[in-house]
Amino acid sequence: MTSADEQGLIGGFHAVMAALEKGRPLLRIWLASGRRDGRAEALRVAADERGVAIESADLAALDKMLPDVRHQGCIAEREMAQEQRESDLPDLLAAAERPWVLVLDQVQDPHNLGACLRSAAAAGVTAVLAPRKRAAGLTAAVRKVSAGGAERVPFVPVTNLTRAIARLQDEGFWAIGLDGEAEASIYDTTLPDRLVLVAGGEEKGIRQLTAKQCDSLVSIPMAADVESLNVSVATGVALFEAVRQRRVPQPS
């Protein structure tokens, strides 16, 4: 049976509206029969402006299309996958005024990946990198959890994560890894403007090889009786500390 992601389906109003707003190529949208509320009408207007057809379908049919996703009575079919090719990364960075990157080292839970993408999009990250193997990809569940984040920030699977970080360092980026055991606090660390923020997976955090590739490691201070934060929470905290620092005027 073909999976929802292989069919290129997006579920949920946030994700579908984000795809429309970002100009992602959509083939069609299905709305639950009888939906006439404000969200449905706003979606109809946005779809009409972009020439995307909307079809009615009963909830049972929509549930069969995305059985494991809370689609809210709204599903869209993408024309193509949203994962970026590794070779696209230089162009993505060159197009950004102040590029910075989030690296996720083997985040395997779709809900964590979706939450990280949502935070990355809200923070204005240029691109999110992750290893192609032993990590979650852009499934329909990830897109739903990301609440449109997966449609707003480029997600770039790479073949070799440490090599990808090294290439970014060669281009003037500095890699800062999140490590709960690091002595330096992220709040006492001046984060570089050309930042590669590296967060680890659910089980062991960033791998030793990845940590060695980082220029420095920082931790998020916590109460003594708390061991660690969920990866998506830690990533969100670190991203918005970077946002806070990036708001400081840069020297001319």
Image (cartoon, grey):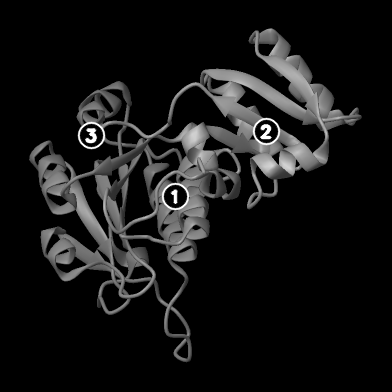
Q: Is residue 100 above or below residue 47?
A: below
Q: Which mark is residue 164?
A: none
Q: Quadrant of the C terminus?
A: top left
- Residue type for callout 3: Glu
Number of other residues with Cα within 10 Å of mark 3, as a class: few under 14, some 14 to 19, many 20 or more: some
216 on left or right of 191: left
Q: Which mark is residue 75?
A: 2
Looking at the image, which residue is at 27% across and 48% down?
A: 132
- Residue type for callout 2: Ile
Q: Earlier in the sequence, mark 3 or mark 2?
A: 2
Residue 97 drawn at (x, y percent): 32, 26
Q: Residue furthest left?
A: 170
Q: Is residue 243 above or below residue 185?
A: above
* Residue at the disc numbered 3: 86
Looking at the image, which residue is at 64% across and 19% down?
A: 28
Discs 3/2, front = 2
The answer to whether residue 234 is visible is yes
* Residue 105 placement: quadrant: bottom left
- What is the C-alpha distance between the residues marked 1 and 3? 29 Å
Q: Is residue 200 above or below residue 174?
A: below
Q: Earlier in the sequence, mark 2 or mark 1?
A: 2
Residue 14 drawn at (x, y percent): 66, 37
Query: How many numbered callouts?
Result: 3
* Residue 40 placement: quadrant: top right
Looking at the image, which residue is at 70% across and 49% down?
A: 70
Q: Secondary structure at mark 2?
A: strand
Q: Secondary structure at mark 3?
A: helix
Q: Secondary structure at mark 1?
A: helix
Q: Which mark is residue 244?
A: 1
The answer to whether residue 191 is visible is no
- Residue type for callout 1: Arg
